[in-house]
C-alpha cells in the first residue's frame, strides 16, 4: 500500500484563488453546515484524532523596536515585561529536553527582533543544529529574513520558519507601522526559496471586521504552496499594550475562522495557537472538530501563559485525541478503528499519571 506523507494530497485539489466574497460566504454558513464541511475535509487529509504538539521558548525577550499594537514585547509600550538578551545555548537545550520529555515533537524558538543581525546568526544556527540533533523538529520566529539568512537557517537544519501575516492587508496599517505587509510577504518568499516549511497565520480579536478575517485567509491561501502550518491566534490582551481594552472576540467567530482555514488549506496544519487560556474545554473541542490539529503545549507561550501541560494531557485523554507522530501518516483508507496505527504517544499519557492526574 502506498504511504502518503502528510502533504502528499493531490496538489490540483488545492486552491489559491479564493475571493473575499466566497470566504465571507463560508464564514456565514450555518454553523452546523460549516463544521460538517470542515470536519469532512479534515478527515480526508489527516487523522482527525491526532494533534501535533509544539513547545515555544522565548530566546530573546522584550525591547523590540517594532510597534505591533498587540505585542507585550514592543519597546513602544510599558507592559512591565522582564526583558532578556539572547539566552545561552545551555538554557535552550535544557528547555528542549524538558519539552521532549513531556511529549512535544516540535520546538519553536522566538526572538523579539525586527530581524536577526549578522552577530546573532551563528548563535541561532547553533541552537537549531543542537535542538535538531536531539530528534526534535525545529521552528524559529526571528522577524524578517534576507534570502541569505533563510538559506543559512535551512542549511543548519531548521524545519519551519514562523512569520505571520497577522491580519488583512486592509487592516494591517491599524496594527503595525514599522514594517509593511509587503515586507512580510518578501520574508515568506525567502523562506520558501530556502526550502524550509512555512508557518504563517494571524491574530483574531484585534477589532477587525469579518471581511478582514476573510481577506487574511485569502492572502494565506494565495501562498503557493500553502503554508504547511497556519497558526490562528486569539489575541492575548496584555496590560500596557494599546489592545488591552479591546472587545472580546465571539468564540464562535474563532471557530468559524478555523473551520474556513481548514476548508481553504485542507492539507495544512491549522494551529489553535495563542489564547487558549481564555478558551474553555468545550470551545477547544469544537476547534479540533472544526479542523485545528496543532497546539502550543507547555505552560508558557513566549511571554504569556498557556494551559499547563497536564491540563492539555487530560483534555486530550477526555477527547480521545493523541499527539501526532513525526513523519508520515498512512493513507486515509487505513484509518479504520481496527488498523488505526498506534502513535508513539504512550509516554505522553504516562506523564499524566506520573503527575497524579
Ligand atoms: N518578532 C518576530 C516577529 O514578529 O516576526 C517573532 C516573534 S512575534 C511575538 C510572533 C507572533 O506572535 C506575532 O506575529 C503575532 O502573530 C504573535 N503574537 C504576539 N503577541 C501576541 C498576542 N498578544 N496575542 C496573540 N498573538 C500574539
Ligand atoms: C504564533 O503565531 N503564535 C506564537 C508563535 N507564533 C511564535 C506566539 C504567540 C505569542 C503570544 C504572546 C506572548 O506570549 O508573548
Ligand atoms: Fe517585535 Fe515580533 Fe512583538 Fe512585533 S510581534 S513587537 S516584531 S516581537
Image (cartoon, rainbow, N blue to C red):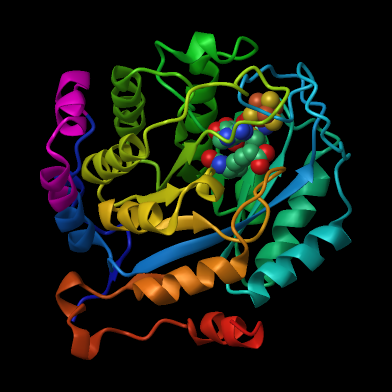
- Ligand 2: quadrant of the figure: top right
Q: 221 left or right of 124? A: left
Magenta: main secondary structure: helix
Q: Percent x, y for residue 293?
A: 38, 58
Residue at (74% x, 24% y) in the render = 74
Residue at (67% x, 31% y) in the render = 238
Residue 32 belongs to the span the image colors magenta = yes
Q: Percent x, y for residue 21?
A: 16, 19
Residue at (88% x, 39% y) in the render = 85
Q: 154 left or right of 41? A: right
Farthest bottom residue in view: 338
Quarter of the view holding residue 66: top right
Q: 301 left or right of 269? A: right
Residue 196 visible: no
Quarter of the view holding residue 208: top left
Quarter of the view holding residue 121: top right
Say above or below: 217 vs 287. Answer: above
Query: From which residue to which does the magenta span run?
Result: 17-37
Q: Percent x, y for residue 199?
A: 48, 43
Near-viewer residue (173 or 298): 298
Residue 357 belongs to the span the image colors magenta = no
Q: Percent x, y for residue 7?
A: 31, 57
Near-viewer residue (209 or 85): 209
Quarter of the image for the N terminus: give it: bottom left
Amino acid at each position: 500500500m502506498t504511504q502518503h506523507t502528510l502533504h502528499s494530497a493531490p496538489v490540483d485539489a488545492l486552491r489559491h484563488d479564493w475571493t473575499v466574497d466566497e470566504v465571507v460566504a463560508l464564514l456565514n454558513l450555518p454553523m452546523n453546515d460549516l463544521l460538517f464541511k470542515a470536519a469532512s475535509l479534515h478527515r480526508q487529509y489527516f487523522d482527525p484524532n491526532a494533534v501535533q504538539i509544539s513547545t515555544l521558548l522565548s530566546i530573546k525577550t522584550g525591547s523590540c523596536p517594532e510597534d505591533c499594537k498587540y505585542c507585550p514585547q514592543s519597546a513602544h509600550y510599558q507592559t512591565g515585561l522582564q526583558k532578556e538578551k539572547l539566552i545561552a545555548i545551555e538554557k535552550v537545550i535544557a528547555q528542549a529536553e524538558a519539552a521532549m520529555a513531556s511529549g512535544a515533537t516540535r520546538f519553536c524558538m522566538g526572538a523579539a527582533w525586527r530581524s536577526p543581525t549578522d552577530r546573532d546568526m551563528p548563535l541561532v544556527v547553533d541552537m537549531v543544529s543542537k535542538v535538531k540533533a536531539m530528534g526534535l523538529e525545529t521552528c524559529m520566529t526571528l522577524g524578517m529574513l534576507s534570502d541569505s539568512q533563510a538559506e543559512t537557517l535551512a542549511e543548519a537544519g531548521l524545519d519551519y520558519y514562523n512569520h505571520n501575516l497577522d491580519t488583512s492587508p486592509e487592516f494591517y496599517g491599524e496594527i503595525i507601522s514599522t514594517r509593511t505587509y509587503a515586507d512580510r510577504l518578501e520574508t515568506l518568499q525567502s523562506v520558501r526559496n530556502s526550502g524550509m516549511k512555512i508557518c504563517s497565520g494571524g491574530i483574531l480579536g484585534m477589532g477587525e471586521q469579518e471581511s478582514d478575517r476573510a481577506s487574511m485567509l485569502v492572502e494565506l491561501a494565495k501562498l503557493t504552496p500553502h503554508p504547511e502550518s497556519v497558526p490562528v491566534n486569539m489575541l492575548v490582551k496584555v496590560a500596557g499594550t494599546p489592545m488591552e481594552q479591546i472587545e472580546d472576540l465571539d468564540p464562535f467567530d474563532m471557530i468559524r475562522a478555523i473551520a474556513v482555514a481548514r476548508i481553504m488549506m485542507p492539507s495544512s496544519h491549522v494551529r489553535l495557537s495563542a489564547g487558549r487560556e481564555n478558551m474553555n474545554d468545550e470551545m477547544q473541542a469544537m476547534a479540533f472538530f472544526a479542523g485545528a490539529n496543532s497546539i502550543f503545549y507547555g505552560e508558557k507561550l513566549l511571554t504569556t501563559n498557556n494551559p499547563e501541560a497536564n491540563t492539555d494531557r487530560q483534555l486530550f485523554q477526555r477527547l480521545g485525541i493523541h499527539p501526532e507522530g513525526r513523519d508520515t501518516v498512512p493513507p486515509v483508507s487505513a484509518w479504520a478503528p481496527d488498523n488505526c496505527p498506534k502513535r508513539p504517544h504512550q509516554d505522553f499519557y504516562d506523564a499524566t499519571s506520573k503527575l497524579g492526574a
